[in-house]
Amino acid sequence: MVSGPLALRWCAGGGRWDMGPDMELPSHSKQLLLQLNQQRTKGFLCDVIIMVDNSIFRAHKNVLAASSIYFKSLVLHDNLISLDTDMVSSTVFQQILDFIYTGRLLPGDQPAEPNFSTLLTAASYLQLPELAALCRRRLKRAGKPFSSARAGAAGLGRPARSQRLSTASVIQARYPGLGDGRKGAHPPQEPPQAKGSDDELFLGSSSQEGAHALGRALCPAAGEAGLGGCGGSTNGSSGGCEQELGLDLSKKSPPLPPATPGPHLPPEDAAQLSDSQHGSPSAAPVPPVANSASYTELGAAPEEPMDLEGSEDTALSRLEGPGGQPRKSLRHSARKKEWGRKEPCGPFERKEVGPKSACPGEEGEGLGDRVPNGVLGGGVGAGGPYGEPPFPCREEEENGKDASEDSGQSGSEGGGGPAGPHFLYRPEGYETVSYGDNLYVCIPCAKGFPSSEQLNAHVETHTEEELFIKEEGAYETGSGGAEEEAEDLSAPSSAYAAEPRPFRCTVCEKTYKDPATLRQHEKTHWLTRPFPCNICGKMFTQRGTMTRHMRSHLGLKPFACDECGMRFTRQYRLTEHMRVHSGEKPYECQLCGGKFTQQRNLISHLRMHTSPS
DNA sequence: CTGGGGAAGGGGCCC
DNA sequence: AGGGCCCCTTCCCCA
């Protein structure tokens, strides 16, 4: 009988490996993990996306599952995992992910002491016992009391501000160029050489075995300070491991250049999209500068920011079944890069600045408050990505488009351009009014307020009854009659006739059945949109639209065609697509009898009939 | 080369 | 929040 070990010896032949007496290859786990980490940083073969606070990380299911029972159960069924941000912030998760892939908490990321409790909480939450133990040891050594991970969690709730400060400090430490030191930051970056204390952060340096015994040798090329053992340096210049974290959405694009200069900020602040999505639009914060970190972490090379758009393409090409059309990817890439290029002060540029202030006028947390009823951001941060539309050129395009399709809002959008400090739509003849310090404007009555709180308080005073009365007045004095009918041709006439629609837009006179819909509609008149895409910065009037948009970034296409396997982001698209297989062409041209599978194609066809040429 | 059709992506908006 | 529909746009194919 030939035993396994014997066979192994034979295979290993030539003594090429320094086999121990027990046939173990000591460096095997190191090499393996090193490879995995490098693959992660490049997004190679990553098969799971982890969203934390709208920061996006990519990883390998196998690695996660091998590290944590919790992850094991999650990745079993899902490709997209969203973590509880009360338990783990994006920054902490970054550290954890690095730890999983390297077995150490890297010197550059060594959290300030208070952060170990945060880490401990997260490690417990994610069921990473080794890391939890490490944190406990660390806390113990530091004399920080902790009763258990749970205690850490209890004390945390949402890591929120305190942790965010710590987080910032971590960033500061990692990227010393990023502004001045911050209170709570641990001592400035130390020489990359490992210190004694660093060893304590090596799981493997103690008695741990296996992959986590890799220690800092994990990514020799990266230098000791490299985050994730890869990416080289604390300043983010990464020799070949440009992506420390996050999603490399450019994977479909030509292979990334090996190095991506410039710092890669970690997702620093939890107050990102999720926060911005909270509550009413009047309270919806625009993501603070921290978003820039998120953008960056998404892995787009700074010089090619819109590469991340390729994600969609990538996903497309990957997901597309035999009937797919990979070519689409390419054209979309090109298309998007084009508009990406136009971005004057895109999110990617902001990473150059300190974590709390990037583009002029951005102030980290105050921004959100500037997206109230009608937000006035221009005065504060002209040129800031949220003070003005982040993609002015794109906006212009859209404005142009809007002008042709919606007389209501386009008038202001298209006409005015970025429109000074006032984001409130102004009806025809509306003159530019200076609100002075009252940058928060109530749409219904156009009063300005100096703060979002005051505006919100004021908005409360607009009762629905009041609105109703107003509208009744409008009906009476009314423009009603034929004019109104004509105006509402686009509205579902049957429903319109059947149900009362007492809620009327003060700007365009459209009416709605309920105030919520009216409010939703009114947002379309704002010149600033309250829901920014956390990836590309594009702004939306509705959260749902933004979410849908995000899906395209992430390549999430839940709706698959049974026939050809092609996948879509929307059910409606799939329905539409299915007609390709069924041959159904429900849209018929009344002029020539031509039939179409898509209504839009009928419309463009009709245009051909009606156009003069 | 051009124009039309087919198919698909994306955003706006109402329900 | 999500579904559904509308519109604009793009790209490819083909006559």
Image: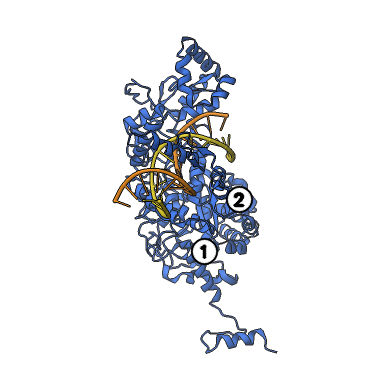
Chain colours: A blue, B orange, C yellow
Query: Element at badge 2?
Result: helix
Q: Which residue is mark 1?
A: A45
Give how far across and how far down residue A566 sits, in percent.
54, 53
Nearest to N terminus: mark 1 or mark 2:
1
Q: Residue at x 55, y 73 (%)?
A: A29
Q: Secondary structure at mark 1?
A: loop
Relative to A268, is A435 on the left or the right?
left
Residue A304 position within the rendered picture, expressed as x and y whole percent measured from the top left: 36, 55
Q: Nearer the viewer, residue A47 or C8?
A: C8
As displayed, is residue A280 above or below residue A87?
above
Residue A123 seen in the current view: yes
Instruction: Specify the amino acid type for callout 2.
Output: Gly
Mark 1 is surrounded, within 10 Å at the Cα level, by few (under 14), some (14 to 19) or many (20 or more) other residues, namely some
Instruction: Give the quarter of the figure containing the N terminus of chain A.
Output: bottom right
Q: Residue furthest right?
A: A1
Q: Is residue A347 visible?
A: no
Q: Same chain, marks 1 and 2?
A: yes
For residue A432, the mark is none
Eyeballing the image, is A523 above or below A29?
A: above
Q: What amino acid is labelled 1 in the image? A: Leu
For the image, the number of numbered tags is: 2
Q: Is A40 located above or below residue A453 in the figure? A: below
Q: Which mark is residue A152?
A: 2
CA–CA distance between discs 1 and 2? 34 Å
Q: Are marks 1 and 2 in contact (CB under 8 Å)?
A: no
Mark 2 falls within which chain?
Answer: A
Q: Is residue A360 left or right of residue A282?
A: left
Q: Give A438 or A314, whichever is nearer the viewer.
A: A314
Dot 2, crowdedness within 10 Å: few (<14), some or many (≥20)? Answer: many
